[in-house]
Image (cartoon, rainbow, N blue to C red):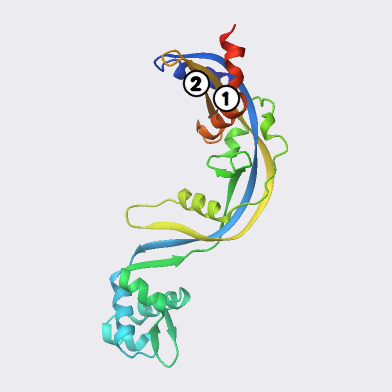
Amino acid sequence: MELLTLQRQLADQLTQMDGAKILHEMSFCIPVHSFKVTYNPVLKKPMDILMKMMLISFQTGVFKDGEALADVLLVEPLFINDLLSKMKKTELVEKEETLRLTAKGEKQLAEGVYEEELDAVSDILQYSPLHKAFLPGDIEEVLEFDEFPEELSYAAGLEVKEVVEDQMIELLTDMQEDDDEVKTYVTSILSSEEIQINDVPCLAYILHDTKTDTLFARVYNTLTKQWDTDLEDVLHTNERANWKGQYLAK
C-alpha cells in the first residue's frame, strides 16, 4: 500500500469523530532495532491419565524399572518406557536405587499439569528506543511501503542502552499459539543478537476538538498497525504549546 493512501484512509476515520477537525497532517519515521532471539518454549497441558498413574505409582510404591511398573499397570512396556524416558528428561522422575518423584514431579502431579521444555526456536523482535520497549508487528510488511519520511527529530541518536529480558519473555509468550487446554510460554532467553535497524513510518494528525477548544495529536504506527499513545505523548510534550499559534491563528 502507498503511504499516502493509508494517510487518507486514517484521515477519513478521524473526521468521523464528533467535533474533531484536522488542522495538520505529517509523517515521520522512528528507528526500530531487530533482534534475533533464541529460546526454549515451555508446553503446559493437562496431565494424561497414564502419566498420572505412573507418577502416583512412583510416589507410593517401589519400582526399579519400567518393566516392573508395566506388569502392575497391565500396560505394554513400550508405552511405559517411552513415557518414563520423557519423565526423566523433564526431571519429573529420578533413579537412585528405585524410581522416585523429584520435587518438580511432586508439584506437577499435585497440580495435574504437565510442563515440557521444547526444542530451541528463534524469532525476530523489534525494539524501539523511543518507546523503550519491544513492539509487536512484522517489519517485513513495513519494508513494503513505497516511501519513507524523514526521521522524527526526537528519535535521532537514540541507542539501545539495555534490552530488558523480561520484556522479551513477555512478548514471546504473547506470540505463542494456544488453545483452551494447551498453553505455551517462555521462561528464559538462550541468546539475543541485534541484526539490523529499520525505519518505521508513522502518520500524525493535529486535531482541534471544537467542543472543548483543545488541540491534540493522533499518531498511527505502521509497525503495530495501531494508534500509538506513546508517540502522541512525545508530540504533546514537545510541540503542543506551539500548535495554537501555528494552526489556529491562520
Residue 131, quarter of picture: top right
Label 1 residue SS: strand
Q: Label 2, on which residue? A: 10
Q: Is residue 45 above or below residue 136?
A: below
Q: CA distance from mark 2 to mark 1?
A: 9 Å
Q: In this rendered view, identify the residue nearer to me: 190 or 76.
A: 190
Q: Which mark is residue 32?
A: none
Q: Going 51% across and 49% down the picture, which residue do you hit?
A: 171
**Residue 136 visible to an observer of this rendering:** yes
Amino acid beneath label 1: Leu
Q: In this rendered view, identify the residue nearer to me: 136 or 182.
A: 136
Q: Quadrant of the C terminus?
A: top right
Image coordinates of residue 181 in percent, x first then y, are: 33, 57
Q: Going 30% across and 74% down the picture, which residue do you hit?
A: 52
Q: Is residue 132 left or right of residue 197?
A: left
Q: Which mark is residue 203?
A: 1
Q: Going 64% across and 45% down the picture, which residue do you hit?
A: 34
Q: Tell me which label, 2 or 1, sits earlier in the chain.
A: 2
Q: Is residue 197 above or below residue 150?
A: below
Label 2 residue SS: helix
